[in-house]
Protein backbone atom coordinates (compact mmCIF):
# COMPACT_ATOMS: atom_id res chain seq x y z
CA UNK A 1 0.00 0.00 0.00
CA UNK A 2 1.39 3.38 -1.02
CA UNK A 3 1.91 6.36 1.29
CA UNK A 4 2.39 9.98 0.18
CA UNK A 5 5.61 11.86 0.81
CA UNK A 6 4.83 15.60 1.01
CA UNK A 7 8.08 17.55 0.71
CA UNK A 8 8.21 21.11 2.03
CA UNK A 9 11.35 23.01 1.04
CA UNK A 10 12.26 26.12 3.05
CA UNK A 11 15.30 28.40 3.37
CA UNK A 12 17.65 26.91 5.96
CA UNK A 13 17.19 29.77 8.40
CA UNK A 14 13.52 28.78 8.78
CA UNK A 15 14.30 25.12 9.54
CA UNK A 16 13.23 25.10 13.19
CA UNK A 17 10.01 27.02 12.57
CA UNK A 18 9.18 24.79 9.61
CA UNK A 19 9.72 21.66 11.68
CA UNK A 20 7.42 22.96 14.41
CA UNK A 21 4.72 23.97 11.92
CA UNK A 22 4.86 20.66 10.06
CA UNK A 23 4.84 18.63 13.26
CA UNK A 24 1.64 20.40 14.36
CA UNK A 25 -0.05 19.11 11.19
CA UNK A 26 1.39 15.63 10.78
CA UNK A 27 -0.38 12.46 11.86
CA UNK A 28 2.42 10.22 10.61
CA UNK A 29 6.19 10.43 10.44
CA UNK A 30 8.33 13.47 9.71
CA UNK A 31 11.86 13.39 8.32
CA UNK A 32 14.12 16.45 8.04
CA UNK A 33 16.76 16.73 5.30
CA UNK A 34 19.28 19.22 6.67
CA UNK A 35 22.90 19.08 5.47
CA UNK A 36 24.21 22.30 7.03
CA UNK A 37 26.39 20.49 9.57
CA UNK A 38 27.27 17.51 7.41
CA UNK A 39 31.05 18.00 7.36
CA UNK A 40 31.28 18.64 11.09
CA UNK A 41 29.18 15.60 11.93
CA UNK A 42 31.17 13.29 9.67
CA UNK A 43 34.49 14.66 10.94
CA UNK A 44 33.42 13.76 14.46
CA UNK A 45 33.09 10.06 13.60
CA UNK A 46 35.32 9.51 10.57
CA UNK A 47 36.78 11.83 7.95
CA UNK A 48 35.21 14.33 5.59
CA UNK A 49 36.74 12.54 2.60
CA UNK A 50 34.42 9.62 3.32
CA UNK A 51 31.29 11.63 2.46
CA UNK A 52 29.66 10.42 -0.73
CA UNK A 53 29.71 12.92 -3.59
CA UNK A 54 25.94 13.17 -3.85
CA UNK A 55 25.77 14.27 -0.20
CA UNK A 56 28.59 16.77 -0.59
CA UNK A 57 26.63 18.38 -3.42
CA UNK A 58 23.45 18.78 -1.36
CA UNK A 59 22.31 22.36 -0.80
CA UNK A 60 23.29 23.98 2.51
CA UNK A 61 20.92 26.89 1.88
CA UNK A 62 17.65 25.02 2.20
CA UNK A 63 16.04 22.29 4.28
CA UNK A 64 13.41 19.77 3.20
CA UNK A 65 10.70 18.62 5.62
CA UNK A 66 9.14 15.30 4.58
CA UNK A 67 5.63 14.53 5.87
CA UNK A 68 4.43 10.95 5.33
CA UNK A 69 0.67 10.47 4.83
CA UNK A 70 -1.16 7.16 5.07
CA UNK A 71 -3.42 6.05 2.20
CA UNK A 72 -6.47 7.03 4.26
CA UNK A 73 -5.38 10.67 4.54
CA UNK A 74 -6.34 13.36 2.03
CA UNK A 75 -3.13 14.86 0.62
CA UNK A 76 -4.99 17.88 -0.77
CA UNK A 77 -6.36 18.74 2.67
CA UNK A 78 -2.93 18.40 4.23
CA UNK A 79 -1.42 20.61 1.53
CA UNK A 80 -4.01 23.28 2.34
CA UNK A 81 -3.14 23.04 6.03
CA UNK A 82 0.54 23.43 5.16
CA UNK A 83 -0.30 26.55 3.17
CA UNK A 84 -2.34 28.05 6.04
CA UNK A 85 0.18 27.27 8.79
CA UNK A 86 3.29 28.26 6.85
CA UNK A 87 1.69 31.47 5.54
CA UNK A 88 0.56 32.46 9.02
CA UNK A 89 4.06 31.77 10.37
CA UNK A 90 5.58 33.78 7.48
CA UNK A 91 7.72 30.84 6.34
CA UNK A 92 8.52 30.90 2.60
CA UNK A 93 8.20 27.42 1.13
CA UNK A 94 7.66 25.27 -1.93
CA UNK A 95 5.73 22.00 -1.87
CA UNK A 96 5.87 18.80 -3.87
CA UNK A 97 4.74 15.21 -3.32
CA UNK A 98 5.26 11.66 -4.52
CA UNK A 99 4.11 8.16 -3.65
CA UNK A 100 6.31 5.96 -1.46
CA UNK A 101 6.00 2.32 -0.45
CA UNK A 102 4.34 1.69 2.87
CA UNK A 103 6.60 1.15 5.85
CA UNK A 104 5.87 0.39 9.45
CA UNK A 105 6.30 4.00 10.61
CA UNK A 106 5.29 3.28 14.18
CA UNK A 107 7.94 0.61 14.60
CA UNK A 108 10.57 2.77 12.90
CA UNK A 109 9.86 5.64 15.30
CA UNK A 110 10.25 3.51 18.41
CA UNK A 111 14.03 3.52 18.25
CA UNK A 112 14.06 7.33 18.54
CA UNK A 113 11.44 7.97 21.24
CA UNK A 114 11.91 6.95 24.83
CA UNK A 115 10.47 7.97 28.18
CA UNK A 116 11.77 11.22 29.59
CA UNK A 117 11.35 13.13 32.84
CA UNK A 118 10.30 16.78 32.59
CA UNK A 119 10.29 19.24 35.47
CA UNK A 120 9.81 17.95 38.99
CA UNK A 121 6.70 15.82 38.49
CA UNK A 122 6.09 14.83 34.86
CA UNK A 123 7.24 11.87 32.79
CA UNK A 124 6.49 11.63 29.06
CA UNK A 125 6.11 7.94 28.16
CA UNK A 126 5.60 6.44 24.67
CA UNK A 127 2.53 4.22 24.58
CA UNK A 128 4.57 1.05 23.91
CA UNK A 129 7.19 1.55 26.63
CA UNK A 130 7.09 0.17 30.16
CA UNK A 131 8.52 2.93 32.38
CA UNK A 132 8.11 2.31 36.12
CA UNK A 133 8.11 5.70 37.84
CA UNK A 134 6.57 7.60 40.73
CA UNK A 135 6.07 10.60 38.46
CA UNK A 136 2.81 11.69 36.83
CA UNK A 137 2.90 10.01 33.42
CA UNK A 138 1.69 11.55 30.19
CA UNK A 139 1.26 8.73 27.68
CA UNK A 140 1.86 9.68 24.05
CA UNK A 141 2.28 8.09 20.65
CA UNK A 142 4.77 9.96 18.40
CA UNK A 143 2.50 9.37 15.43
CA UNK A 144 -0.25 11.52 16.91
CA UNK A 145 0.56 15.02 15.62
CA UNK A 146 2.35 17.75 17.54
CA UNK A 147 4.01 17.03 20.80
CA UNK A 148 6.06 14.21 22.18
CA UNK A 149 7.76 16.58 24.58
CA UNK A 150 10.99 16.51 22.59
CA UNK A 151 10.61 19.85 20.83
CA UNK A 152 12.05 22.73 22.86
CA UNK A 153 8.86 24.82 22.82
CA UNK A 154 6.77 21.92 24.13
CA UNK A 155 9.33 21.03 26.81
CA UNK A 156 9.50 24.64 28.02
CA UNK A 157 5.72 24.83 28.38
CA UNK A 158 5.53 21.46 30.13
CA UNK A 159 8.18 22.58 32.59
CA UNK A 160 6.19 25.75 33.27
CA UNK A 161 2.96 23.81 33.78
CA UNK A 162 4.77 21.45 36.14
CA UNK A 163 5.79 24.45 38.23
CA UNK A 164 2.48 26.34 38.29
CA UNK A 165 -0.35 23.75 38.41
CA UNK A 166 -1.22 23.04 42.02
CA UNK A 167 -4.77 21.67 41.70
CA UNK A 168 -8.23 22.92 40.73
CA UNK A 169 -7.21 25.33 37.98
CA UNK A 170 -9.17 26.22 34.85
CA UNK A 171 -6.80 26.08 31.86
CA UNK A 172 -6.96 27.44 28.31
CA UNK A 173 -4.60 26.06 25.64
CA UNK A 174 -4.48 28.29 22.53
CA UNK A 175 -3.43 26.43 19.38
CA UNK A 176 -3.84 23.16 21.22
CA UNK A 177 -2.70 20.84 18.39
CA UNK A 178 -2.56 17.34 19.89
CA UNK A 179 -3.74 18.68 23.24
CA UNK A 180 -0.50 17.78 24.99
CA UNK A 181 -0.35 20.89 27.19
CA UNK A 182 -4.00 20.79 28.20
CA UNK A 183 -3.74 17.07 28.97
CA UNK A 184 -0.56 17.59 30.99
CA UNK A 185 -2.29 20.31 33.02
CA UNK A 186 -5.20 17.98 33.77
CA UNK A 187 -2.92 15.14 34.84
CA UNK A 188 -1.04 17.56 37.09
CA UNK A 189 -4.31 18.41 38.86
CA UNK A 190 -6.15 21.10 36.91
CA UNK A 191 -9.93 20.81 37.25
CA UNK A 192 -10.77 21.49 33.61
CA UNK A 193 -9.13 22.52 30.36
CA UNK A 194 -10.22 23.95 27.05
CA UNK A 195 -8.19 23.66 23.86
CA UNK A 196 -8.78 26.13 21.02
CA UNK A 197 -7.47 25.54 17.51
CA UNK A 198 -8.47 26.64 14.02
CA UNK A 199 -7.75 23.14 12.69
CA UNK A 200 -10.71 20.70 12.94
CA UNK A 201 -8.28 17.74 12.83
CA UNK A 202 -7.09 18.71 16.29
CA UNK A 203 -10.43 17.74 17.81
CA UNK A 204 -9.88 14.13 16.81
CA UNK A 205 -6.20 14.02 17.75
CA UNK A 206 -6.62 15.75 21.11
CA UNK A 207 -9.58 13.51 21.87
CA UNK A 208 -7.53 10.38 21.19
CA UNK A 209 -4.70 11.60 23.40
CA UNK A 210 -7.11 12.64 26.16
CA UNK A 211 -8.73 9.19 26.14
CA UNK A 212 -5.30 7.55 26.20
CA UNK A 213 -4.55 9.51 29.38
CA UNK A 214 -7.95 9.14 31.06
CA UNK A 215 -8.88 12.84 31.04
CA UNK A 216 -11.35 13.01 28.15
CA UNK A 217 -14.20 13.99 30.50
CA UNK A 218 -12.34 17.15 31.60
CA UNK A 219 -11.00 18.37 28.24
CA UNK A 220 -13.08 20.36 25.77
CA UNK A 221 -11.55 21.08 22.36
CA UNK A 222 -13.08 24.00 20.46
CA UNK A 223 -12.58 24.69 16.76
CA UNK A 224 -12.23 28.39 16.01
CA UNK A 225 -10.20 31.36 17.14
CA UNK A 226 -9.66 32.82 20.57
CA UNK A 227 -12.22 35.64 20.32
CA UNK A 228 -15.03 33.25 19.32
CA UNK A 229 -14.47 30.39 21.71
CA UNK A 230 -12.84 31.40 25.01
CA UNK A 231 -15.24 32.48 27.78
CA UNK A 232 -14.84 33.77 31.32
CA UNK A 233 -11.43 33.80 32.92
CA UNK A 234 -8.69 31.20 33.36
CA UNK A 235 -6.05 30.46 35.99
CA UNK A 236 -3.53 29.32 33.36
CA UNK A 237 -3.35 30.16 29.65
CA UNK A 238 -0.89 28.45 27.27
CA UNK A 239 0.01 29.71 23.80
CA UNK A 240 2.64 27.49 22.20
CA UNK A 241 2.33 28.85 18.67
CA UNK A 242 4.42 31.37 16.67
CA UNK A 243 5.63 34.92 17.25
CA UNK A 244 3.16 36.72 14.99
CA UNK A 245 0.18 34.84 16.42
CA UNK A 246 1.25 35.62 19.98
CA UNK A 247 1.58 39.32 19.16
CA UNK A 248 -1.86 39.32 17.55
CA UNK A 249 -3.72 37.49 20.30
CA UNK A 250 -2.06 39.09 23.34
CA UNK A 251 -4.59 41.97 23.71
CA UNK A 252 -7.49 39.48 23.60
CA UNK A 253 -5.82 37.00 25.94
CA UNK A 254 -4.99 39.49 28.72
CA UNK A 255 -8.60 40.01 29.90
CA UNK A 256 -9.10 36.22 30.01
CA UNK A 257 -6.38 35.70 32.64
CA UNK A 258 -7.43 35.81 36.28
CA UNK A 259 -5.56 38.09 38.63
CA UNK A 260 -2.66 36.04 39.96
CA UNK A 261 -2.89 33.65 37.00
CA UNK A 262 -0.13 32.52 34.65
CA UNK A 263 0.12 33.17 30.91
CA UNK A 264 2.86 31.31 29.03
CA UNK A 265 3.79 32.05 25.43
CA UNK A 266 6.27 29.94 23.48
CA UNK A 267 7.18 29.06 19.90
CA UNK A 268 9.39 32.15 19.64
CA UNK A 269 12.93 32.06 18.26
CA UNK A 270 15.68 34.08 19.96
CA UNK A 271 15.79 36.65 17.18
CA UNK A 272 12.19 37.70 17.86
CA UNK A 273 12.36 37.71 21.65
CA UNK A 274 12.47 41.49 22.09
CA UNK A 275 9.53 42.32 19.83
CA UNK A 276 7.29 39.62 21.34
CA UNK A 277 8.20 40.70 24.88
CA UNK A 278 7.30 44.29 23.99
CA UNK A 279 3.95 43.18 22.54
CA UNK A 280 3.09 41.20 25.67
CA UNK A 281 3.90 44.11 27.95
CA UNK A 282 1.93 46.49 25.73
CA UNK A 283 -1.09 44.16 26.02
CA UNK A 284 -0.99 44.42 29.80
CA UNK A 285 1.09 41.42 30.79
CA UNK A 286 4.02 41.56 33.22
CA UNK A 287 6.92 39.29 32.31
CA UNK A 288 7.90 37.29 35.39
CA UNK A 289 10.32 34.85 33.76
CA UNK A 290 11.92 34.18 30.38
CA UNK A 291 12.98 30.59 29.74
CA UNK A 292 15.31 29.59 26.91
CA UNK A 293 16.29 26.29 25.31
CA UNK A 294 18.38 25.75 22.16
CA UNK A 295 17.36 28.98 20.45
CA UNK A 296 13.71 28.98 21.56
CA UNK A 297 12.06 31.26 24.13
CA UNK A 298 9.12 30.80 26.53
CA UNK A 299 7.66 33.86 28.27
CA UNK A 300 5.97 33.40 31.64
CA UNK A 301 3.66 36.32 32.41
CA UNK A 302 1.23 37.63 35.00
CA UNK A 303 -1.54 40.19 34.59
Image: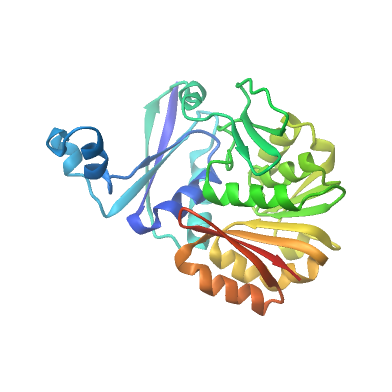
Position of 173 compared to 70: left or right?
A: right
Query: Does residue 199 appear in the picture of this structure?
Result: no
Q: Is residue 273 or residue 244 the one in the foreground? A: 273
Q: Where in the figure is residue 120, as x and y percent of width and height?
A: 68, 42
For this view, does 56 lie left or right of residue 242?
left
Residue 285 position within the rendered picture, expressed as x and y whole percent measured from the top left = 70, 73
Rendered view: 113 above or below 179: above
Q: Where is residue 90 in the image (x, y as percent from the top left)?
A: 46, 63
Residue 69 horizontal side relative to residue 8, left or right: right
The quadrant of the rendering that contains the N terminus is top left
What colouring method underlies this structural image? rainbow
157 over 43 or under it: above or below: below
Q: Which of 103 and 210 is in front in this view?
A: 210
Kindly identify the residue that appears in the image at 49 percent across and 43 percent down: 76
Q: How many numbered callouts?
A: 0
User: Which residue shows up at 47% across the image and 21% down it?
Assistant: 104
Residue 157 seen anywhere in this rendered image of the structure: yes
Q: Where residue 121 appears, x then y in whole percent?
A: 71, 40
Q: Which residue is drawn at 58% across and 30% down?
A: 115
Res 114 quadrant in image? top right
Q: Quadrant of the C terminus?
A: bottom right
Q: Residue at x 63, y 30 (%)?
A: 125
Amino acid sequence: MEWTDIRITVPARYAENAEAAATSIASGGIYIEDYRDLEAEVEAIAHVDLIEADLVNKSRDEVIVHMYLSPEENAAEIAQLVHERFTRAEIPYSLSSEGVEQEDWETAWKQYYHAMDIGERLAIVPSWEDYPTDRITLTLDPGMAFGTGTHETTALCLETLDACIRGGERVLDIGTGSGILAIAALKLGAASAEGVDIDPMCVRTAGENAALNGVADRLTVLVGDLSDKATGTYDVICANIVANAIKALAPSAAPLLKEGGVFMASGVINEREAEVAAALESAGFTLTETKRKNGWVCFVCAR
